[in-house]
Image (tube, grey):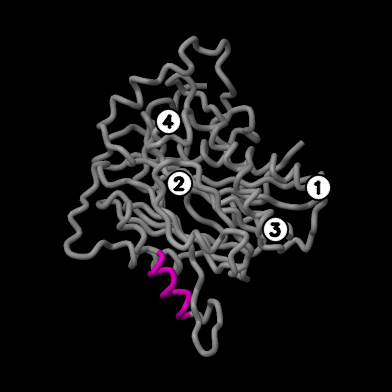
Amino acid sequence: MKTTGARNLITDVEGLLVGNAQDSKLKSGVTALLCENEAVASVQVLGGAPGTRDTDLLDPHNTVETINGIVLSGGSAFGLDAASGVQAALREKGVGFQIGEAVIPIVPGAILFDMINGGDKDWGLYPPYRELGYEAVRAAKPDFDTGTAGAGAGAVTAELKGGLGSASTLLDNGVTVGALVAVNSVGTVNVGGGAHFWAAPFEIGDEFGGLGLPAPLPASTTDLRIKFRERQNLEGTNTTIAVIATDAILTKAEAKRLAIAAHDGYARAIWPAHTPFDGDLIFGLATGGSGTRINVDGFIDLCAAAAATMARAIARGIYDAKAEPGDLWPTWKAKYGNVG
């Protein structure tokens, strides 16, 4: 039987901190994941409309092996500025890749589209994401808010308000895997437009309501053409972006394989996933904090846990979302909170 880490957050992976910064008027924000020690990382992009920074360096054949942090941000392409703020905060701390006297924080990032969600995006000449990135680093700690927070502050799904989700799993060999995700998908996370989550088979306890799957399954479980196409015709206006992390010792190639496996969690929790209008991607991260090197069988178990943990984190992000003035979509709790 799988169990969660102590917090049921990605920070159960030793060596990680997370900070959020958001603006409720803007309906957008930034999440910074910080590595207390340099960590091995890679990335896998499967969506058709990604927005990224410094992801090429994460290919296993490229030179840089480790990173100092990862940024998830709202704001579409404007949100790429968030990584500059994170870099500035880390440089103040003397954290980064040392080349002579230069210290260069290595901080890849990804963005989602939350520009048309009821928030006030009239920010003047320069967008606020650099400052939000800086604030997110200053707020980084083991415990952090989920739901309407950080990069999930302005997120939406096909019919519900989106959000920032996280979850963790403790494997039998003592290795921990954790997921952090900002859910802003074209598709839906709930079965047939009802209260039940697609991720229900992987739920541990009642972390997102404990409803299980509907019985019997609705006849129209996949007939969602109207639901997600009733939204304005805004190509490239979504994206689910995430980090899957472990405290096992992995190579850069194995970190990429872990990210690939975690995409199965998207497919288990969102229907449809990886569409041409989503920029779906997952960063794979290994801190090595457990000191454990795993064999082939252990790596298969790790990849399976990565997919399940990601699916749970996605559902938790929606479940934890909070209603705010000006919302264009209802939260799960507002619509289904009395079900059960």
Q: Earlier in the sequence, mark 1 or mark 3?
A: 3
Q: Disc 2 on helix, strand or loop?
A: strand
Q: Mark 3 points at which residue?
A: 247
Residue at 34% in and 32% down: 330
Closer to the observer: label 2 or label 4? 4
Direction bottom: furthest residue: 101
Q: Name the residue under label 4.
A: 187
Q: Is residue 99 left or right of residue 240?
A: right
**Disc 2 + disc 1, Cβ < 8 Å:** no
**Disc 3 + disc 2, Cβ < 8 Å:** no
> Is there any visible trace of residue 180 in the rendered image?
no
Q: Disc 1 on helix, strand or loop?
A: helix
Distance in Å between CA atoms under marks 2 and 4:
14 Å
Q: Which segment is the magenta one?
A: 83-92
Q: Classify residue 128 by image quadrant.
A: bottom left
Mark sitting on residue 182: 2
Q: Which amino acid does label 2 sit on?
A: Ala
Closer to the observer: label 1 or label 3? 1
Q: What residue type is labelled 4?
A: Gly
> Is there any visible trace of residue 54 in the rendered image?
yes
Q: Which of marks 4 and 3 is nearer the N terminus?
A: 4
Q: Earlier in the sequence, mark 3 or mark 2?
A: 2
Whether residue 99 appears in magenta in the rendering, the answer is no
Instruction: Identify whether 64 is placed above or below 26.
Output: below
Q: Is residue 23 left or right of residue 30?
A: left
Residue at 18% in and 64% down: 125
Q: Earlier in the sequence, mark 1 or mark 4?
A: 4
Q: Is residue 165 left or right of residue 151?
A: right
Mark sitting on residue 296: 1
Q: Disc 3 on helix, strand or loop?
A: loop
Residue 5: % across, % down: 68, 49
